[in-house]
Image (cartoon, rainbow, N blue to C red):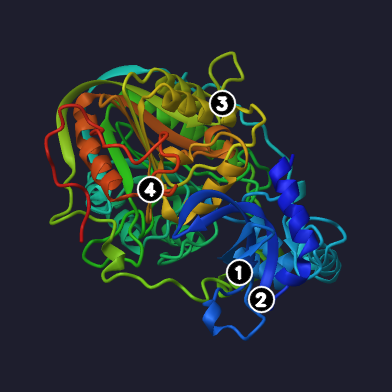
């Protein structure tokens, strides 16, 4: 429901359409001002333009006014989806239906197309009328949308799998971060395979890691993998489909591979996970678990000798414990059995429509990319030398496996979100969370709202709460947070290329996981994590988080709403942590 302020600004927009309908302006809506990639907290008219240009370079009369009726006009350059929607709404709809989770867009009910001034989502808007006409004229794209909409649901019910309970272990544990040592640590882990790899994976597009699989899985060694088929990663060496075909050809009947049961996967006859099989877990020889926030791609697992254009911050952990491995194997086996029983043969018409829509969207990306600093590809590394992995040879700790969409026994309570809420509620001093993004809540008391509210309550209780998100997604969800729901923007900082989903609580407990903060991420998609109650592990990840926090930038302009004032002095994430290489490379 639109706020009184939103309705007032919307009235200003509709009364001044002639002042906003300039060449290249796509939409206008009520929103919040963003200056220098930071929220100011001031209300604004947000005008989305195809390509943002300096006012001085525009013909006379084509520049948008700086304000209308005392409300600032904030000019934003459209993203690829918004540009494509303006010229080809059906292709935009197909590409968004088969998107990656991070490409979700906030809903702006009062956004109006220009020059008509109609609400963008109204059936009477030019956008929606064109979409309806295209749907009739382009049966292949219409089939792609219908296949997604009408795909039957297979209820997720992992019968026979063990309960997800905390376990006390004494184990060899390895910790590592990307870009510093993720690939090297994974390569060493894979090379130790003696019998089998059992895997659940979202994205597998690294040629180097594919080569490791082929060289390490020799003789009688076997592979079982459930694989998602997301929209192509920009840093890919090959597609997920090509990875699967290569593994099948190389390993023959030693490879058991199935496409995940996601709604957007055109290889799946039914769906259990609505948006993504987003898990990143490898079990080696039924005795060791590699679990990560990062996929098997070049940006999450970069080769420092040949870095891609994007290197992401990710956390990784290996726990060599047979009981924990058996738990994950049980769920991965269940995923494989249900997926293998519900595979579709190739559907060339639908696949071509999706591929064409994605290609059209890619052509609309970044007509005026911002200037990049020197060595931009290495901005996510460490100062001086990369942070090395750390091996704890005989570490005693409590470990809790986390899975979505699993529920607690005999309840409908989500196992992941219940544990995370309990962890955050129980924090005595500090909560350090680093995520790719935090979607805005809707203010409807949903489970997701409750999760964000627990964080807000701890901020209100004057706990030291630090939230780092990727600068790539912070602005759209930060502005939506200001618009409705639980507002955490005063405690959010941004950093480029964060892909992590990690926590450090009180310098004693660490979460390494694949769950993003979104309604689907905490409750619906297939994701996995570990709660690791260990000060030693916290002392590894803590200085890295602290360095990232030190290099981050407040989402809100300094002094406006960060815990009620100017940016606070930072306390370290890890207790008793020694000064260490801070996790950055210049």
Q: Name the residue that disc number 4 marks.
A: 294
Between residue 315 and residue 111, name the one nearer to us: 111
Q: Position of residue 435 (x, y in %)?
A: 42, 43
Q: CA distance from mark 1 to mark 2?
A: 18 Å
* Local SS, label 2: loop
Asked whether the residues under the numbered discs 1 and 4 touch, taking CB atoms below 8 Å apart as contact, a structural biologist would say no
Q: Which mark identifies residue 450? A: 3
Residue at the spot 30% in from the left edge and 69% down from the top edge: 373
Q: Earlier in the sequence, mark 4 or mark 2?
A: 2
Q: Name the residue that disc number 1 marks.
A: 361
Q: CA distance from mark 3 to mark 1?
A: 35 Å
Q: Residue furthest front?
A: 70
Residue at the spot 79% in from the left edge and 57% down from the top edge: 119
Residue at the spot 58% in from the left edge and 67% down from the top edge: 80
* Local SS, label 3: helix
Between residue 78 and residue 522, name the one nearer to us: 78
* Placement of the C terminus among the 4 image quadrants: bottom left
Q: Quadrant of residue 318?
A: top left
| Position above or below: 568 against 130 | above
For disc 1, the neighbor class at 10 Å (few under 14, some 14 to 19, many from 20) is many
Between residue 285 and residue 272, name the one nearer to us: 272
Residue 586 placement, left or right of 476: left
Q: CA distance from mark 4 to mark 2?
A: 38 Å
Query: Looking at the image, is mark 1 or mark 2 nearer the viewer?
Result: 2
Residue 545 placement, left or right of 274: left
């Amino acid at each position: 429901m639109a706020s009184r302020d939103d309705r007032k600004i919307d009235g200003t927009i509709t009364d001044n359409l002639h002042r906003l309908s300039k060449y290249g302006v796509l939409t206008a809506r009520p929103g919040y001002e963003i200056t220098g990639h930071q929220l100011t907290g001031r209300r604004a008219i947000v005008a989305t333009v195809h390509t943002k240009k300096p006012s001085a370079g525009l013909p006379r009369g084509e520049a948008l006014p700086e304000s209308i009726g005392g409300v600032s006009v904030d000019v934003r350059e459209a993203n690829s989806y918004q540009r494509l929607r303006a010229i080809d709404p059906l292709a935009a709809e197909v590409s968004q239906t088969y998107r990656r989770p991070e490409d979700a867009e906030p809903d702006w009910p009062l956004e109006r197309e220009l020059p008509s001034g109609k609400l963008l989502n109204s059936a009477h808007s030019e956008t929606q009328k064109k979409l309806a006409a295209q749907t009739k004229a382009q049966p292949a794209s219409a089939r792609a949308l219908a296949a997604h909409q009408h795909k039957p649901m297979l209820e997720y019910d992992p019968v026979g799998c063990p309960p997800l309970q905390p376990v006390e272990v004494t184990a060899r544990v390895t910790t590592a971060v990307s870009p510093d040592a993720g690939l090297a640590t994974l390569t060493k882990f894979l090379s130790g395979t003696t019998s089998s790899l059992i895997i659940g994976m979202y994205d597998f597009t690294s040629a180097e890691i594919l080569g490791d699989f082929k060289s390490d899985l020799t003789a009688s060694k076997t592979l079982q993998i459930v694989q998602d088929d997301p929209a192509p990663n920009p840093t890919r060496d090959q597609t997920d489909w090509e990875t699967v075909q290569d593994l099948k050809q190389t390993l023959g009947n030693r490879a058991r591979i199935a496409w995940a049961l996601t709604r957007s996967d055109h290889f799946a006859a039914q769906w259990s996970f609505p948006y993504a099989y987003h898990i990143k877990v490898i079990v080696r020889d039924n005795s060791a678990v590699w679990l990560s926030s990062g996929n098997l791609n070049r940006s999450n697992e970069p080769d420092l000798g040949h870095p891609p254009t994007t290197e992401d911050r990710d956390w990784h952990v290996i726990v060599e414990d047979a009981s924990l491995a058996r738990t994950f194997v049980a769920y991965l086996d269940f995923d494989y059995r249900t997926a293998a029983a519900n595979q579709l043969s190739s559907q060339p018409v639908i696949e071509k429509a999706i591929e064409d829509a994605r290609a059209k969207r890619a052509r609309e990306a970044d007509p005026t990319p911002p200037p990049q600093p020197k060595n931009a590809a290495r901005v996510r590394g460490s100062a001086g030398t990369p942070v090395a992995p750390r091996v704890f040879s005989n570490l005693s700790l409590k470990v809790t496996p986390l899975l979505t969409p699993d529920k607690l026994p005999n309840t409908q309570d989500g196992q992941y979100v219940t544990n995370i809420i309990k962890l955050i509620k129980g924090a005595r001093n500090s909560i350090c969370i680093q995520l790719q993004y935090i979607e805005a809540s809707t203010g409807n008391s949903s489970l997701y709202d409750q999760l964000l509210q627990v964080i807000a309550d701890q901020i209100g209780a004057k706990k030291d709460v630090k939230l780092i998100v990727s600068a790539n997604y912070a602005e759209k969800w930060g502005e939506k947070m200001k618009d409705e729901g639980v507002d955490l923007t005063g405690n959010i900082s941004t950093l480029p290329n964060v892909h992590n989903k990690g926590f450090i609580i009180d310098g004693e407990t660490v979460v390494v996981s694949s769950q993003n903060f979104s309604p689907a991420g905490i409750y619906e998609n297939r994701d996995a994590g570990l709660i690791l109650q260990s000060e030693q592990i916290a002392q590894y990840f803590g200085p890295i988080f602290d360095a990232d926090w030190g290099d981050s930038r407040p989402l809100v302009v300094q002094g406006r709403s960060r815990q009620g004032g100017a940016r606070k002095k930072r306390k370290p994430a890890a207790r008793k942590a020694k000064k260490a290489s801070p996790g950055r490379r210049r």
